Image (cartoon, helix red, strand yellow):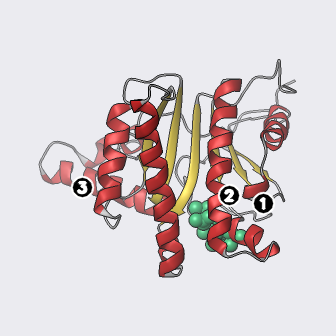
Amino acid sequence: MPIDGISLPQHIAIIMDGNGRWAKQRGLVRTEGHKKGAEVFRKICRYASDIGVRYLTFYAFSTENWKRSKQEVGAIMDLLRNYLFEMEERERENEGSGYRIRFIGAREGMPADIVELMDAAEARSADKTHMHINIAVNYGGRAEIVHAARLLGEQIKAGALQPEEITEERLSALLYTADQPDPDLIIRPSGEQRLSNFLVWQSAYAEFYYDDVLWPDFTPEDLDKAILAYAKRDRRFGGVQSQ
Ligand code: IPE
Ligand code: IPE
Ligand code: MG
């Protein structure tokens, strides 16, 4: 492992992008790219767990991705269903992982059977501690902040909170990522250099790493490269440069 001796980012977030272009390059339908992307997701989870990453967040489906064709959205939902079934199956055979899973994003609007499976997977993994995996599904960073703002509004309406008591900590505690550290490193493959509504609040001081490789071609070595690049950054958080 080339990253031996390097201090790892505690929380890595990945925008799994480029599935459609990967398929197109091969003359395949877009859904084939998503299928391959889902395999790469599993591989990267295993690798990150092996090297000791504590928090790993994946952007799987955004609030804006509903704009895609019914067929493509359906195929992505099927892949998610398969993953959830597979998780259950593995656990039944006692081959479960040590991952604590959290699905971040709005449950409203998601197929009811998937919501049930997601809730069950979260509950079953609640006492796992080896690695935390967040999967962002029907996720939008702005929607997440609006959701938290509404909850604060309700507390104020109920007389349980004063407006001046709203702090960054209180708002953070109402986000889907409550109790988790902010991402240290955000990786986006596929050559795009934008956030696309991912972790809008949490990325305030994240380091960004862009890679031209398409997600279905992303390998553990690519993750190593991103981690090595991160290790060379000087994070100042508004302070002065370290020596
Ligand atoms: C990412 O790959 C997967 C989702 C957004 C669901 P894309 O499907 O966006 O792939 P490109 O960007 O079209 O290549
Ligand atoms: C971001 O990718 C969302 C996911 C990877 C799930 P998109 O492909 O949807 O983003 P844009 O449209 O290129 O900004
Ligand atoms: Mg894309």
Tell me residue 201's x, y (percent): 52, 51
Point 50% across, 48% down: residue: 135
Q: Is 39 situated left or right of 26 in this image?
A: left
What label sits on residue 98 in the rendered view? none
Residue drawn 52% across the image and 82% down it: 69
Secondary structure found at label 2: helix
| Image mark for residue 214 | 1
Residue 172, compared with residue 114, is above or below; it is: above
Residue 16 appearing in the image: no
Q: Locate ligand 2 by image quadrant.
A: bottom right
Nearer to the camera, 25 or 130: 25
The reply, left or right, for residue 11 in relation to residue 110 is right
Q: Earlier in the sequence, mark 2 or mark 1?
A: 2
Q: Residues within 10 Å of mark 2 (few under 14, many from 20)?
A: some
Spatial CA span between label 3 and label 1: 41 Å
* Camera-nearest label, 3 or 2: 2
State yes or no: Cβ of the residue under disc 1 lies below 8 Å from any atom of ligand 1: yes
Residue identified by numbered label 2: 36
Residues 119 and 212: in front is 119
Marks 3 and 2, how far apart in space?
42 Å
Q: Position of residue 47 (x, y in %)?
A: 70, 33
Quadrant of the rendered structure where residue 149 is?
bottom left
Q: Is residue 94 visible?
A: yes
